[in-house]
Each structure stands twice: as C-alpha cells, then as structure tokens.
Image (spheres, helix red, strand yellow):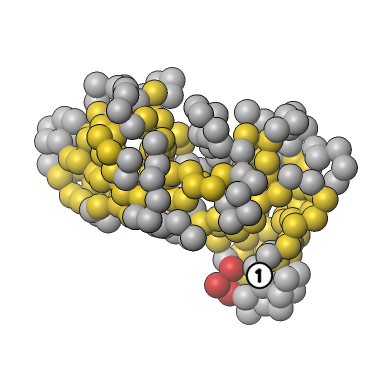
Amino acid sequence: GAVVSQHPSWVICKSGTSVKIECRSLDFQATTMFWYRQFPKQSLMLMATSNEGSKATYEQGVEKDKFLINHASLTLSTLTVTSAHPEDSSFYICSAPSRSFRGESYEQYFGPGTRLTVT
Amino acid sequence: LAKTTQPISMDSYEGQEVNITCSHNNIATNDYITWYQQFPSQGPRFIIQGYKTKVTNEVASLFIPADRKSSTLSLPRVSLSDTAVYYCLVGVSYGGSQGNLIFGKGTKLSVKP
C-alpha cells in the first residue's frame, strides 16, 4: 500500500522557538494532505487541510498564524509550529489519500506521527 | 460528515472473535465506512473499508446491514498484538475537499492472555 513518512519522529524544542514537521507521500502523489493533533489518551483532531499550490484550510479554533502549512509539491507538506509553547506539546500526524486497490474509493494513509515536546 | 458512536472499551481473550459495532445514523448515500487501528505513539493504520453488505480481507471482516446505519468490525481469533484503539470513520470516498476525516473517540480493545 501507499506509504506516508514524517520527519522528525520526535523533537524537543524550547518555548518561543519554531519547529518544522515534514510529511511526505513516498510512492504516490497527493494534492491534498491532512494534519492532525493528538493529545495523550485522546482521539485525533483534524487541524487543517493542506492543498498543493494553494492556501491551507484550517479547522475552527486552529490558529493559522501559529500553525503554518506549506504544500509546495505533490509529495511534501510541512507544518511549522511557530513560537511554540508547552501547551503545543502533542503528537502530530499527517495523512494523504490514495486510491484503494480496486480503484472504487480512496483510503487515507497516515504517517507515523511526530512527537513534539516544548520545554 | 456523519457522526459515529462506538463503545469506549472492550475486553477479550486471546483466540476469541471480537466484534466492534459502530453506529452512524446520519450516513449519506455516498459515504464509505472505514476502520482504522492505532497503537500508542503511532499513526492510524487502515484495516478495512466497505460500502454495503460484507467485506472481508486478510485481517478482518466488515458487516454492513442494508440500512447502513451501523457497521460491525469482526476480528477473528485475536491475539495480544491486537490490543489497540479502533476507529470507525464515515465519509465520502475522497474527492476534492471532502476527504478530511473526523475521528470519534474510538474503541480501546484490550486482549488478555
């Protein structure tokens, strides 16, 4: 099946600094990717939809100036957490859709996630 | 997007068959039903997807009644490694801007020896 990678897998940064997380579709092209955030023992929360060549669409309550998303190519989307604070510490996961084996529908393929800790 | 309701948790023993049911009363005509498995500190992994009746693959079966207002994920002969959170998602077979997925709380399955 399709593979989505994320880099880094974990990162520790100091409060006030910015952190960039990369999401790549390795063997398929993705004009759209999705970014999620997951706090401990909670479900995934959709943050934004990343669109190749255009602006991202943010979910209600997600600060677009704090979580900068860039989708510059068909295989790469980046999420930059600007001026990070301890409350931004979380597990960030991206996903990209790809056609299912039978071609009848699409399946979402998720990256392995990035653990961000802000000290 | 249709909202889903699942049991918060389930317990089972190795070798048993586990059935997790998900309710999605507001499912739309074009919606597919997809189940994902998530282990701690990992991204969700696709298990199975279906539209109606029954779908089976190498790891699970998905049963969908005619009214499609619910679905049941069946895991045959579970093992300890099946301990995970299972999410049922309902949404349009991705197209355009409709592909984003809204996760419910999921079902935490605990398999005991």
The quadrant of the picture occupied by the N terminus of chain B is top right
Q: Give B46 or A118, whichever is nearer the viewer.
A: B46
Q: Which residue is mark 1?
A: B58
Residue B74, position as x, y percentages in the image: 74, 61
Q: Is residue B99 above or below residue A3?
A: above
Residue A75, position as x, y percentages in the image: 32, 45
Chain identifier of the residue bearing label 1 in the image: B
Residue A29, position as x, y percentages in the image: 38, 45
Picture residue at 75% right of the left edge, 31% below the top: B29
Q: Give B29 or B6, whichever is nearer the viewer.
A: B29
Judge from the rendering whether residue A119 lies leftward or rightward of residue B27; answer left or right: left
Q: Give B59 or B10, whichever is nearer the viewer.
A: B59
Neighbours of disc 1 within 10 Å: few (<14), some (14-19), many (20+): few
Judge from the rendering whether residue A118 lies leftward or rightward of residue A49; answer left or right: left
Task: Determine whether the residue tagged by mark 1 lies in a helix, strand or loop.
Answer: loop
Picture residue at 32% right of the left edge, 24% below the top: A54
The quadrant of the picture occupied by the C terminus of chain B is bottom right
Q: Amino acid at mark 1?
A: Glu
Picture residue at 20% right of the left edge, 51% below the top: A11
Picture residue at 18% right of the left edge, 40% below the top: A19
Q: Is residue A78 above or below residue B71?
A: above
Q: Is residue A39 visible?
A: no
Judge from the rendering whether residue B85 lies leftward or rightward of residue A85; answer left or right: right
